[in-house]
Amino acid sequence: MEPDARSETLVVRIGAITRETDEILKFVLVDPNGGALPGFAAGAHVDVHIAPGLTRQYSLLNPPGEGRQYVIAVKREPQSRGGSAAMHGGLAPDDLVRIGSPRNSFGLDHGAAHHLLIAGGIGITPLLCMAHQLAATGGTYTLAYFVRAPELAGFAEDLAPIARAGRLQLHAGLNAEATIAAMAGLLARQPEGAHVYTCGPCPLMDAVGELAKACGRDLPVHREDFTALPLIAGPDLAAFEVQLAQSGEILPIPPERTIADVLIEHGVALDTSCEQGMCGTCLTRVLGGVPEHRDTFLSEEERAAGDHILPCVSRSRTPLLVLDL
Ligand code: FES
């Protein structure tokens, strides 16, 4: 199947929807004509264009060798800003959905001597894919899966071969202290040359990073940040102003609003999609001032250059930010 050349997206059909837990649905996406889909490697995700202006990123959880399907899972979030609610309530088998081609910022380092995969909740999805890929290529790994209760684990079919291989550690119902102790023990036992991959709630990933540093040796940690939305607006943030270069108009950005919200409210033609600083749709040139980047789209070099901003999430380090609008 060819990606849509205009937008690098493709249309897929929902082949099946199955319930993994009370909160999690699994979606199998296939080519409407039964053809092959663009390939991917473990750690890849796709943008799902759920509705106009509503795009969300979901990791692929099935083995990369499965060329005719993508499998994703979506947790129903009580605080959903539209994405998980629409995926849970608005889609049915045989519906057609537009998605982006797989992208990957969370790939395996094949030079690692061992791979420790640490998942929290729905963060298991990219790590399942990694476990499948490592099993297929003979890589050694351990998958540690932390969930609030056994019935919230789900993915029984996907986890079964990993458990049979003796590579699954399921930690259900641990309190925070016990979770930290379990992770510290795991990290301390890693062999020289091991790499750590983590996906899940931000506090869990932060703890993995801190514990790995505390081990006192080189233990690289790779993390996937889908579930960790940056603080993009709130009473603790600073107010600033944005100037529109073309008209000279100056708009105040209060702590509890994003730049994008204010621009759109004032009739500025700004395209947005994910509204999470991930897709790059709202990328805007900066002509003055210093942006405070809160996105996950720009590279380190692009951030340092300071000449572009993702106004759906990012803010300003200076009292005035001049945008090329
Ligand atoms: S809308 Fe996706 S990065 Fe701003």
Image (tube, helix red, strand yellow):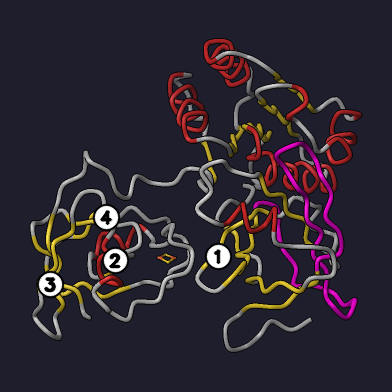
Of the image marks 1 and 2, the number of the one nearer the N terminus: 1
Amino acid marked by disc 1: Thr
Residue that badge 4 annotates: 257
Q: Is mark 1 within 8 Å of ligand 1?
A: yes
Residue 19 lies in what quarter of the image? Answer: top right
Residue that badge 2 annotates: 309
Amino acid marked by disc 2: Ile
Of the image marks 3 and 2, the number of the one nearer the N terminus: 3
**Is the residue 28 above or below the residue 101 in the image?**
above
Tag 2's secondary structure?
Answer: strand
Left or right of 157? Residue 140 is left
Of the image marks 2 and 4, the number of the one nearer the N terminus: 4
Amino acid marked by disc 4: Arg
Of the image marks 1 and 3, the number of the one nearer the N terminus: 1
Q: Residues within 10 Å of mark 2 (few under 14, many from 20)?
A: many
Residue for point 62% across, 32% down? 120
Residue that badge 1 annotates: 55
Amino acid marked by disc 3: Gln
Q: Quadrant of ligand 1?
A: bottom left
Marker count (numbered): 4
User: Dots 2 and 4: beta carbons under 8 Å?
Assistant: no
Tag 1's secondary structure?
Answer: strand
Left or right of 42? Residue 184 is left
Nearest the camera: 215 or 296?
296
**Foreground label between 1 and 2:** 1
Residue for point 56% across, 11% down? 181
Q: CA distance from mark 1 to mark 4?
A: 20 Å
User: Dots 3 and 4: beta carbons under 8 Å?
Assistant: no
Q: CA distance from mark 1 to mark 3?
A: 28 Å
Q: Residues within 10 Å of mark 4 (few under 14, many from 20)?
A: some
Residue that badge 3 annotates: 243
Residue extent of the magenta highlight: 14-43
